[in-house]
Image: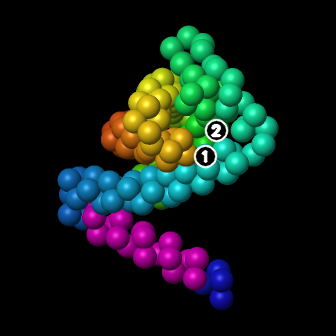
Amino acid sequence: MVQEQKTEKKGVLHKVDSAAAEKGSAVVTAWQFVKFIVVSLLACIVQFALLNILQLLPPIQELFTRDFHWWVFDYPAAANGLGYFIAFNVSNIAAQIVAFFVNRKKTFNADNNIPVTLTIYILATLLLICFSAWLSPTVNAWLIGMDVNDKLAGNISTMVCSTLQFFIYFPIDKLLMRQKKKK
């Protein structure tokens, strides 16, 4: 019974993919974008849940009072310091892992070489995470300076970074995952 439901669900998605393919590449891209939105929302749930869970852990909370300044990263204690740096980046990385594998299989139906695709994806992700890790404390500190609750400020700054990543990742993923293995 469970196996039949899985086959049926896969069948429905496959049917919609096939119908989109019959309409042309613009419709395929639009349908991929819709699926990308759904997967991004799933990744966002993972990121926000993990961010908020990590910030509740006593070892992370102890690091809120410790400034963290390294390279372009500036996480002052006033904006939850090293604790927020760790919580933000661990949750961001976890969300990107979920997004990569689900988008690869469900959004783009890719069966290309995982080691090559994943290596390029990891490089792009590192650049985006570094950018977000630089931007997030800036937004977070600004919001806290505006008397926004520190947990709310952390969530808003994460939302800003997630939104930027969403619009940057779609073309990257579409380009990386467009190739199919030759049969």
Nearer to us in this view, 16 or 159: 159
User: Callout 1: helix, strand or loop?
Assistant: helix
Q: Name which residue lies at 33% across and 59% down.
A: 34
Task: State the separation of the CA atoms marked 1 and 2.
Answer: 5 Å
Q: Position of residue 134 (x, y in %)?
A: 48, 23
Q: Position of residue 19 (x, y in %)?
A: 29, 69
Residue 120 lies in the magenta-colored region:
no
Q: Position of residue 9 (x, y in %)?
A: 50, 76
Colour scheme in the image? rainbow
Instruction: Specify the principal SS of the magenta part.
Output: helix
Circle 1 crowding by C-alpha within 10 Å: few under 14, some 14–19, many from 20: many
Nearer to us in this view, 80 or 132: 80
Q: In the rendered view, would you say 76 is above or below 45?
A: above
Q: Earlier in the sequence, mark 1 or mark 2?
A: 1
Q: Name the image quarter holding residue 58.
A: top right
Contact? badges 1 and 2 (CB < 8 Å): yes
Residue 34 visible in the snapshot: yes
**The disc label shown at residue 51, or none:** 1
The N terminus appears in which quarter of the rendering?
bottom right
- Residue furthest bottom as drawn: 1
Q: Name which residue lies at 67% across and 51% down.
A: 53
Residue stretch rendered in magenta on the structure? 5-21
Q: How many numbered marks does the figure carry?
A: 2
Specify the amino acid type for callout 1.
Answer: Leu
User: Callout 2: helix, strand or loop?
Assistant: helix
